[in-house]
Amino acid sequence: MLNQIKKYRIFIGTFVVFSIITISLFYNVLKPAKTLPIYNPSDVNPELVDSTVQYISKSHTIGNFSFINQNGKRITQKDYEGKIYVADFFFTTCGSICPKMTSNMEDVQKAFLHNPKVMLLSHTVTPEIDSVPVLKKYAIAKGVVDSKWNLVTGDKKEIYSLARKSYLAVKLGKPEELYDMVHTENFVLVDAHKQVRGFYDGTKKEEIKRLIDDINWLCQNDKK
């Protein structure tokens, strides 16, 4: 018996290797190709979406905006034209989730520091506190690279409108304050066509890895 096994060991070994290769090829053929959804207001938790756009089920894109960044420069949609970018909402005096979110956004910055197709955009939800000098001080402390990452302030109503109507990512605050916002941990991935392609928990490292993987996929597949 042992002699028979030795006699056919080359055949058995070849068969096993062939079987593994064949199974791997079938798996790769049958495995669904990676895709990223395109999110519209009707696809998202209504708590995060302004009631005036909740019915929209297709062709949703990020609206035009105009804010001032940490260097006192006006930032508009033009600065992000044709770019893949990650947007979030924060405030500099936040002591709960913001420090972790900012640290994780810095990881995203590092991952794409030399990729001109990818940018970052952080909006303050307390513009009355987060002036340009305050944002600049925060940016320096957090290692923000100006050419890659804009921290922006501006009109509170405009920030609120963009958060709820475009990025679909911010909850309502107190009912008595019309433009009070409870910012969430959401990082929002936007493609080169201004479409929302993903939401990620900005406080979790595993979600940041998923975000980086999805940005890489968009860089390869989202041709303009």
Image (spheres, rainbow, N blue to C red):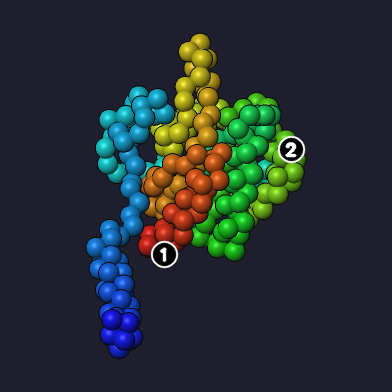
Quadrant assignment for the C terminus: bottom left
| Residue corresponding to mark 1 | 220
Query: In the shown orientation, is residue 94 left or right of residue 33?
Result: right
Farthest residue, direction front: 1
Snapshot quadrant of residue 59: top left
CA neighbours of label 2 inside 10 A, class few (<14), some (14 to 19), many (20+): few
Instruction: Report if the CB atoms under discs 2 and 1 are less than 8 Å apart.
Output: no
What's the amino acid at mark 1? Gln
At 41% from the left edge and 34% from the top edge, which residue is drawn?
168
Residue at the (56%, 27%) spot, across then down: 156
Callout 1: 10 Å neighbours few (<14), some, many (20+)? few
The amino acid on which the numbered mark 2 sits, given as a three-letter code, is Pro
Q: Secondary structure at mark 1?
A: helix
Q: Is residue 71 above or below residue 170?
A: below
Residue at the limit of the structure toward the bottom, as seen here: 7
The quarter of the picture where residue 139 lies is top right
Q: Residue at x 65, y 37 (%)?
A: 99
Which secondary structure lies at badge 2? helix
Residue under pointer 2: 133
Position of the N terminus by quadrant: bottom left
Is 43 drawn above or below residue 3 in the view shown? Answer: above
Q: Tell me if residue 113 comes above or below residue 172 in the rendering.
A: below
